[in-house]
Amino acid sequence: MRDPDQRAVYAAEDQLLAWLDATDPDRPTVTIDGETYAPEVEPRFTDPEAAASYVAKVLGHLREHGKAYDSREQLDVSVRPRNGRTQAHYEPDTLTIAVPPFEVGGQWALRGLVVLHEIAHHLCGERDHGAAFRTTHLRLLEDIGQPVTADLLHLAYAREGLEQLDHRATDDTLAKIAKLLRQAEGTRNEHERDAFLARAQSLATRHSVALAVARAHTARQERRDQPVSEHYRIGERGKRGLARYVRLLVNIAHANDLRCTINSDSTAVTMYGFATDIAVTRALYESLLVQMVSDCERYLASPDRDTTVAWDRKARKYVERPVATITARLAFYEAYGIRIGERLQEARDAAVAAAVQGEESTASGPTGQRGPSGSGSTAIALRQKELDVHDYFADALRRNNIRGTWSGDRRSAMDSAPTAAHEGDRAAQRARLGDEKALGEAG
């Protein structure tokens, strides 16, 4: 399917509409899974012209409050009636939302959530209903003052297996954030520091997951005691260096007892394991990715670059030239990912050893001999966890008919740029592993 998430997104939104329709002024709350929600009032419209006024109001609110969506919030969007009654859609070429009017049976479309769905397409800039669209839709609800509705939408997404949202940030974005943070650290002027930090935070916020994601995830993750899977988007097809991003994520995942499948074009990874381990892996990856890209940019801006000998056709002789930037970048990323994997595995092994040793000390009798209660429960639990993940992963491979092995980073760049590789290794050595404690606890 060209848009594999479309059906599930529509089903999730139908569920949300059903929850909202179950409320009224006399009963303003709805209870789901034992939790009570009081969603915001959803606007209804009499015709496409009224919907157009609402669209203008929403976009005006975003502009007034500095809610940036890659400047797409600055573009005006019109609304027109469409002849068909079964669909509403967004036309990116004309910046137009088409909704069926009452006359053709379009009363279902003349409501706030349907119109916001199309505005999210406009703000996202994508036609399909993938992770980027879902993130934009949730964030839009948050930004216009509908956080409870955002929570409910995210809950509906989760019920349809659509928990993965967009966590992507381009090299350029990460480098800009890193530059602003360095400027903040380098100034003694308090006002300048606050300004740099505010700009960095604003830029980061535009590429972050909606607040509803964090709240919903925190509320749900402790209730899960079975392996799950999560599809994680790495980047767009054709982008150079995706395989190194994948390797960094996979190395972190393996140290957190996860198994992975990888798209052949390195655009996405699916992680299999326990929810808490996936959460730790995702948090570590997103932190280390920022550090890796910003450290690499600093290295590439320095004069300490690898060189290579190449034939100069004009001079008709061999000359020494700097190694191509992409080659240096790939070598840096490759070495960085390897060293991070080693550090995390060492941290995991140390945490497990400490847990086993602490259990043995507690279980020892007064003579120092191991008592009857010292049954090695830590080792047993770890083995059971390993078997649970193994069986879940094996079943997923069978169900999805997944075969073959990933070879995205089989060609190494480190020999072509040894200095870049050395600097990548050094950067990984000093990288902050803020979740090392959580890594051990998750095991």
Image (tube, rainbow, N blue to C red):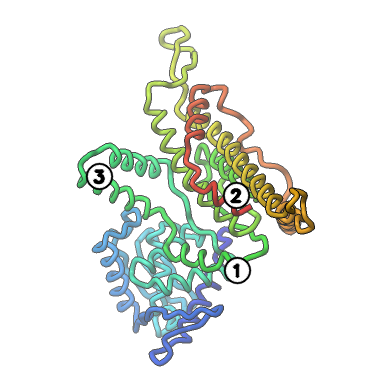
Label number found at residue 223: 1
Q: Residue furthest front?
A: 367
Q: Is residue 263 visible?
A: no
Q: Which residue is mark 3?
A: 193
Residue 307 at x, y percent in the picture: 46, 17
Q: Amino acid at mark 2?
A: Gly
Task: Relative to 67, say whether 423 is above or below.
Answer: above
Q: Earlier in the sequence, mark 3 or mark 1?
A: 3
For the point 37% across and 55% down, which residue is it?
205
Q: Earlier in the sequence, mark 2 or mark 3?
A: 3
- Tell me the SS state at disc 2: helix
Q: Is residue 53 left or right of residue 205?
A: left
Q: Amino acid at mark 1?
A: Arg
For the point 56% across and 27% down, which residue is it?
413
- Tell me the SS state at disc 1: loop
**Residue nearer the viewer, 330 or 94:** 330
Label 2 crowd bin: few (<14), some (14–19), many (20+), radius 10 Å = many
Label number found at residue 440: 2
- Tell me the SS state at disc 3: helix
Residue 193 at x, y percent in the picture: 25, 44
**Residue nearer the viewer, 140 or 339:** 339
Residue 294 at x, y percent in the picture: 41, 37
The answer for how far apart the CA atoms under marks 1 and 2 are is 20 Å
Label 3 crowd bin: few (<14), some (14–19), many (20+), radius 10 Å = some
